[in-house]
Amino acid sequence: MSRLPALAITTDERHGVTVAARDLATAAEAATGLGLAVAAGVLLGEHPPERAHLHFTDRLWAGSPEAAAALVERIAARTALTVTLHDVPQASDGPRNRPRRTACYARVAGAARGVVVNSRHEAAHLTEAGIVPRVLGVVPLPVTPAPRTVRTAANSPDLAVLGFFYPGKGHAEVVDALPAGAHLTVLGSASAGHEADLLAFVEHARARGITVGVTGYVPEKDLVERCRAVAVPVVAHRHFSASGSLATWIAAGRRPLVVDGRYPREMAELRPGTVRLVAPARLAEALAEALADPASTWLAADAVTRPHLDDTAAAYLRWWTGDIAW
């Protein structure tokens, strides 16, 4: 186990990538008995670790893709580095941002001894972008099932989309598929820089006769309860990378409606019985069916929720000790 890296934890405790890094570090420490977690700032301190692993999305590390890539290159010049890439660049970034983010991720991958992505879908995105890491691992995002409780009726007959709001997350598609009089809950807050987009979305929904409730940031201790309180959970991204929101719905015992695509099909294969795939053209029909039968949006007893967090930690430990040339 001496070849294991220090596991860097970023400072934004509300960010899903920070949560993923922290959870992995906790599970890896439990499996090995070693103290592996370090604050991300240590990587640029006077005494950086010999080896390190960090979780990367450009917006978490710097104010621009170029600055984020340069920062990781500085770290990689000081310590042997492996990286988990999150929010892999794709079409939803738009014609201005996608080339910049693709160049950023190519630089990060080039600086690292090895790269992990969270799905075969993301690995395909890297290949399509011409990004070829020295070593590439695929480790799915974990599900950490909350204790099962007696199923209770939803507090209101609403639908909910979980996670940060930003254009392309699926909120607009859900609203456009709902009849007047419906209610949608945004379980989360606007992603940084998209506050005006959220206000415009709420006005668009109101013009269609649909009310929208925005919870703002939901503390982790309250998240499962909020996920269990809604009638119908929906995941309707137009462009998936990997989805922590989907894993959270499943962890809460829900079987969300998920708009079909390459990543949703991969997750349905990985975890049978945990999602209901819906063709985009059938979204309105599927939402109406789920509202009429909310029981269909809960996991059955035979649903497969693994891999869990301990499985994820074991996969990383095998990768660090077996695949990486430190």
Image (cartoon, rainbow, N blue to C red):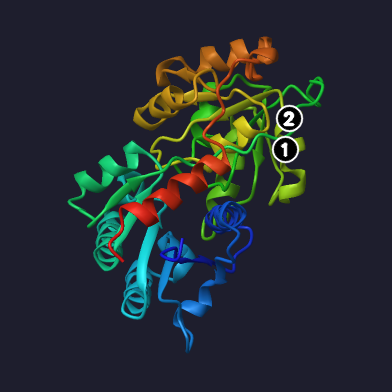
Graded by Cα atoms within 10 Å as few (under 14), some (14 to 19) or many (20 or more), the crowding at tag 2 reads many
Q: Which residue occupies 43% across, 59% down?
A: 57
Amino acid at pointer 2: Arg
Residue 287, position as x, y percentages in the image: 57, 17
Mark seen at residue 198:
none
Q: CA distance from mark 1 to mark 2?
A: 6 Å
Q: Nearer the viewer, residue 161 or 317?
A: 317
Amino acid at pointer 1: Val
Q: Which residue occupies 38% across, 60% down?
A: 83
Q: Nearer the viewer, residue 157 or 16?
A: 16
Label 2 SS? helix
Q: Is residue 139 above or below residue 317?
A: above
Residue 18, position as x, y percentages in the image: 56, 59
Q: Which residue is mark 2?
A: 228
Q: Horizontal placement of 278 versus 292: left or right?
A: left
Residue 54, position as x, y percentages in the image: 45, 64
**Rendered image quadrant of residue 182:** top right
Q: Which residue is mark 1?
A: 224
Q: State the quadrant of the C terminus.
A: bottom left
